[in-house]
Amino acid sequence: MQDTLTALAEHHGDGDNFRQLMKDTAAKRFDEGFWKTWESWIAPVLGEPAQIADFGSGPAILLQNLRDRYPDAHLIGVECAPWMLEVENSHYELIEHDLHEADLPIADNSLDAITAIFVLHELKQPIEFLKSIHRCLKSGGRSLIVDWVRAPLELYLANQISDDIFTTANSHAELSNLFTHFTEHNRYSREDVAWMLQQIGFKVLENVPLQQGRFGRWIVEKD
Ligand SMILES: C[S@@+](CC[C@H](N)C(=O)[O-])C[C@H]1O[C@@H](n2cnc3c(N)ncnc32)[C@H](O)[C@@H]1O
């Protein structure tokens, strides 16, 4: 766990600022398109009451939205960063767990749906995480995954910084941070992620680009 927290602290920078950033930008991640996708692919497989988990739940904005939509659902957030676990919570179960580890305390075949939004790229290796999604879903259960995928440097930079880095006097620290994040956000292609999901045993129902191909979205189903 300590290795994970050290790596996340480096990736996120100041924890309080990052938590606030995740809150401030949540409306963009959970926009009309997200809920349209939810209604098309996830809502049809939910039981009564729905059993839903959000892996890497951050400040739990998605869980709060889900509580509004599904007042009776059993909602679970899984998160490891202390700066995210501080969020006020009375609407869902919060499990403190490092998703690199296999022993996530959620029963086998117990969930209708699992979301994982911008978490995959933060894991040193995603195999136990993907296996946990597969293990915890019921047969016929579905997962909705959204994350960064490989994109050309020019497209990436155009969306990260308004300066022209070739003519502006950015500091070494600013440039280093920018290029470090480029490598961290550009780990997998969409096909890499789809391939790993298939190898874990999922049927990939959807594999589409978002935001000019900077992000990918996958919907998968357990047999
Ligand atoms: C980019 S944030 C996204 C948060 C949330 N899904 C959202 O979209 O608002 C990724 C979250 O995954 C969590 N995370 C990253 N690696 C993790 C791990 N190994 N175990 C548990 N949570 C992890 C981070 O702490 C962070 O809160």
Image: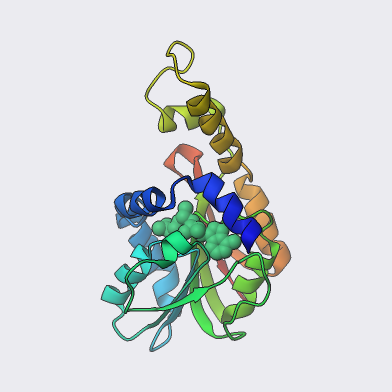
* Looking at the image, residue 174 lies above or below residue 198: above
- The outermost residue toward the right is 199
Extreme-top residue of the structure:
167
> Looking at the image, which residue sits at the far left?
68
Q: Quadrant of the N terminus?
A: bottom right
Could you say which quadrant of the image residue 210 lies in?
A: top left
What x and y, as percent, mark residue 117? Answer: 47, 58
Q: Position of residue 15 (x, y in %)?
A: 43, 52
Res. 44 image quadrant: bottom left
Res 223 visible: no
Please name the residue shown 30% across and 68% down the image: 65
The image shows residue 128, relative to residue 75, as above or below, that is: above
Q: Nearer the viewer, residue 91 or 154?
A: 91
Question: Is residue 40 shown left or right of residue 95?
Answer: left
111 to 145, vertically: above or below: below
Farthest residue toward the bottom? 48
Left or right of residue 71, residue 150 in this image: right
Left or right: 36, with 10 as reference point: left
Asked whether 191 or 157 is in front, the reply is 157
Q: Quadrant of residue 46?
A: bottom left
Of the 4 image quadrants, the one containing the C terminus is bottom right
Applied colour scheme = rainbow
From the viewer's perspective, is 9 left or right of 167? right
Image point 69% across, 58% down: which residue? 196
Residue in view at x 54 percent, y 38 percent: 181
